[in-house]
Image (cartoon, rainbow, N blue to C red):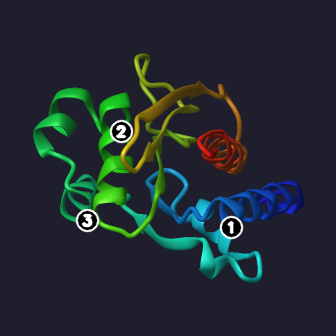
């Protein structure tokens, strides 16, 4: 894993903005395996902003922990806009958070297909009593660590953009 310092600086600024806005956060992670929550909770005092994190790596975990409909996973695949949105909305429904970020993607080095190549990640941020925002990123042929870290950076950016 490469240097986390830039991500920690971003996380610290995000937590301060959440604090000022009175916003609690939850995470729902697949391809990052809890790294978003780890970066957020590396910051002292984060417990007043971070409510909880869900690591839902398997399809059954996405359904059991977050309420993602297995039929949607079967229809669209785990790495899809629909699943990312449902993961974020499920994290809100199963937490006290005001914002939830979700990520699902292909971190590689294997597992990619022509339709869903390594580096494809779907992210979503659900806002309690508001819209769910989606972003698709295609990071291309990078290392697993680079894909995961770039995904964390994008997730933090999306959370920040969702704040008042």
**Image-based side of 6 in relation to 143, left or right:** right
**Residue matched to label 1:** 19
For marks 2 and 1, the one nearer the N-term is 1
Compared to residue 135, the image places residue 96 above or below, namely: below
Q: Residue at x 36, y 57 (%)?
A: 92
Front position among marks 2 and 1: 1
For marks 3 and 1, the one nearer the N-term is 1
> How much space separates mark 3 and mark 2, taking CA atoms?
14 Å
Q: Residue at x 61, y 79 (%)?
A: 48
**Residue matched to label 2:** 85
- Secondary structure under tag 2 reads helix
The location of residue 114, given as percent across then percent down, is 43, 17
Res. 126 image quadrant? top left
Q: Contact (CB < 8 A) between labels 3 and 1?
A: no
Res. 50 image quadrant? bottom right
Compared to residue 72, the image places residue 113 above or below, namely: above
Q: Seen from this angle, which residue lies furthest left? A: 71
**Residue matched to label 3:** 65
- Secondary structure under tag 1 reads helix
**Image-based side of 136 in relation to 116, left or right:** right
Q: Quadrant of the N terminus?
A: bottom right
Res. 60 image quadrant? bottom left
Q: Residue at x 46, y 58 (%)?
A: 98
**Image-based side of 64 in relation to 147, left or right:** left
């Amino acid at each position: 894993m490469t240097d986390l310092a830039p991500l920690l600086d971003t996380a610290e600024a995000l937590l301060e903005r959440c604090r000022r806005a009175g916003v609690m956060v939850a995470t729902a992670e697949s391809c990052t395996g809890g790294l978003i929550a780890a970066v957020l909770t590396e910051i002292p005092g984060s417990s007043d902003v971070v409510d909880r994190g869900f690591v839902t790596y398997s399809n059954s975990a996405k359904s059991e922990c977050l309420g993602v409909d297995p039929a949607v996973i079967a229809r669209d695949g785990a790495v899809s806009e629909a699943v990312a949105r449902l993961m974020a909305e499920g994290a809100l429904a199963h937490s006290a958070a005001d914002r939830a970020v979700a990520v699902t993607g292909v971190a590689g080095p294997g597992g990619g297909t022509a339709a869903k190549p390594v580096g494809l990640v779907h992210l979503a941020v659900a806002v309690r009593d508001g819209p769910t925002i989606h972003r698709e990123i295609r990071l291309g042929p990078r290392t697993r660590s680079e894909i995961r870290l770039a995904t964390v950076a994008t997730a933090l950016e999306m959370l920040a953009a969702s704040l008042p």
